[in-house]
Image: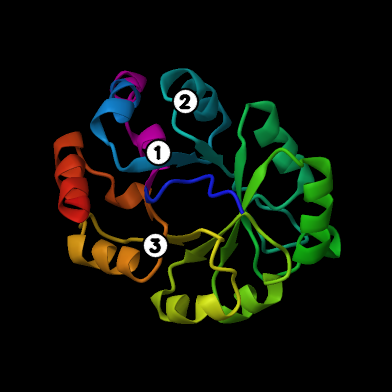
Amino acid sequence: MDNFLGQGLILSLDYFYDNINSYILNKLLLNINNSFTNVTAIKTSYLNLILELKYSTDLPIIGCINKVYPDTIVNLTPTINDIYELAKVGVNIVYLDASTKMRANSMTIHEFYYKIKLLFPELYFIGVVYTLEDIKNISSLKFDAICIRDNYSIISNVTNYVSSDVPLIFDSVVTDNLLIDDKYIELFDSGINNIIINSKIITPKHQLQEFIENVFN
């Protein structure tokens, strides 16, 4: 399988987009390519920001849509229409819920994935899982990458169900502003290909750059 993501960090920009002005955001975007050499992709759930990123960086852009629908508890890129919206603004990597939960219109993840692979053969899909049961359930679907969301305990069991050539991503829902170098090093050593730096822990440029250097040097 084509590893479409080099090993490294995925930078989430959603917090910046909500909390700082466009001038500071644009300054960051213009510096990403040169300054953060171990950032391999950028993730966002804002369509307008995706359009800005297309003109500001050569890094791959991972898109998702957070939306609530009345007939499902899945809200991370839950429908085919959401993927159409992402494709229209130029996303080529889609981040979506791949759990066992039923989607809108009582659609299973298997039914959903077969449809989107037919409709969007040019896109890469990252399946987000939360439990070992989720991983077992999608083991036959051949996602382009698997993202484990906030569950360290299942990492050691993933290789029993996921092919070794499928990139593994870790996305931690962080509640504070601390970047812990040792935890990231440990995750990479365990076979994780990418770690998402979530919006809660994105810090000023000099602090983020120092953190990246500590992890990779």
Question: Residue beneath label 1, please?
Answer: 13
Q: Where on the picture, by quarter, is residue 164?
A: bottom right
Q: What is the crowding at mark 2: few (fewer than 14 residues within 10 Å), some, or many (at least 20)?
A: many
Q: Tell which tag, 2 or 1, sits nearer the viewer.
A: 2
Mark 2 to mark 1 CA distance (whole Å): 10 Å
20 vs 44, nearest the viewer: 44
Q: As drawn, is 36 to the left or to the right of 110?
A: left
Q: Earlier in the sequence, mark 3 or mark 1?
A: 1
Q: What is the crowding at mark 3: few (fewer than 14 residues within 10 Å), some, or many (at least 20)?
A: some
Q: Earlier in the sequence, mark 2 or mark 1?
A: 1
What color scheme is it?
Answer: rainbow
Q: Is residue 108 visible?
A: no
Question: Residue beneath label 3, please?
Answer: 172
Q: As drawn, is 23 to the left or to the right of 6?
A: left
Q: Is residue 84 above or below residue 214?
A: above
Q: What is the secondary structure assignment of the residue under circle 3?
A: loop
Range shown magenta: 9-26
Q: As drawn, is 214 to the left or to the right of 144?
A: left
Residue type highlighted by circle 2: Leu
Q: As drawn, is 86 to the left or to the right of 10?
A: right
Residue type highlighted by circle 1: Leu
Residue under the image location 48 percent in, 21 percent down: 52
Residue type highlighted by circle 3: Ser
Question: Residue beneath label 2, please?
Answer: 53
On the image, the x and y values in percent for residue 3 come to: 53, 49
Mark 3 to mark 1 CA distance (whole Å): 15 Å
